[in-house]
Image (tube, helix red, strand yellow):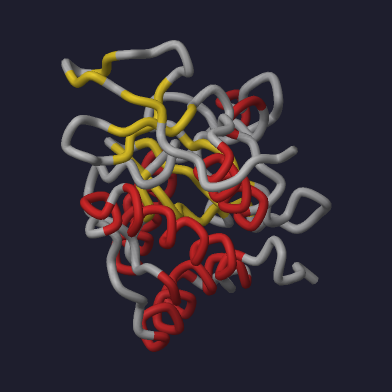
Amino acid sequence: MTNSYTSVRTSWARIDAWLQRYAPATFAQLAPPADPYEYDQAQREMGLSFPAGLLESLSCHNGAEPYSTVLPQETPLSVTEIVEFWRMRIAVIDGEGEPEDSLDDDGEHWWHRLWIPWAAVDGDAQVIDMRPGPGQGRIGLAPKDDNGAFDGDWGWPSLETYLFQVAEALELGEPVGDSVPHLKPNGELCWAYSSDIELDGYELTPAPTTRSRW
């Protein structure tokens, strides 16, 4: 069981508090909570039980505006978008199939019906792996043009772990993978390499911290 220190709800509360104080324009990109009926219906439609962490996340924010940079990796999806993305990928593998030799060296699929796309940008999804076994609940990347991956900077043991690290990064100025929080001149949050001073023509400044680890 996840304790309150690492719960998704606690992490979102920390993220929200930081955004409201330092990047209100980015906070405004987050949607209000989902209606529980929506995610109950989604689970029935997909034939999957959403993990507790995802249900907590949706009860905090039902996704975010497209291309929002509230998180360092993909943009959280709404319940409707989760179902639509999952359906789209299922339609591909049901229609075209995925032969055994399509698996990569790590034995990963391009898509699996027990993956829940909780966040996505431009067809690449950050998924929660609900296949039975010790890796159930882990986070990985399912690109549109490559097989899934659950290691490296895109691999997380759980949604709880990932969002906890995001909250820590905002408060302490620490990286998530290779991305560090910065602010654009308009006050929006963005994530970039620690050495970056400019991104897409915008001058960047390191995001303010609220506490020190020492």
Q: Is residue 156 left or right of residue 176?
A: right
Q: Quadrant of residue 79?
A: bottom left
- In the image, 89 versus 24, the foreground residue is 24
Q: Quadrant of residue 52?
A: bottom right
Residue drawn at the location 58% of the way across and 56% of the way down: 114
Q: Is residue 75 left or right of residue 186?
A: right
Q: Is residue 103 left or right of residue 201?
A: right
Residue drawn at the location 62% of the way across and 22% of the way down: 104
Give x and y (percent) for residue 37: 38, 88
Q: Residue furthest bottom?
A: 37
Q: Is residue 54 left or right of residue 34?
A: right
Residue drawn at the location 53% of the way across and 73% of the way down: 55
Residue drawn at the location 28% of the way across and 66% of the way down: 31
Give x and y (percent) for residue 101: 61, 24
Determine whether 185 is above or below 35 in the image. above
Quadrant of the snapshot with the N terminus: bottom right
Give x and y (percent) for residue 146: 46, 25
- In the image, 107 versus 15, the foreground residue is 15
Q: Quadrant of residue 174?
A: top right
Determine whether 41 is above or below 212 in the image. below
- In the image, 88 versus 143, the foreground residue is 143
Give x and y (percent) for residue 69: 32, 41
Quadrant of the snapshot with the C terminus: top right
Count of numbered circles in the view? 0
- In the image, 22 versus 49, the foreground residue is 22
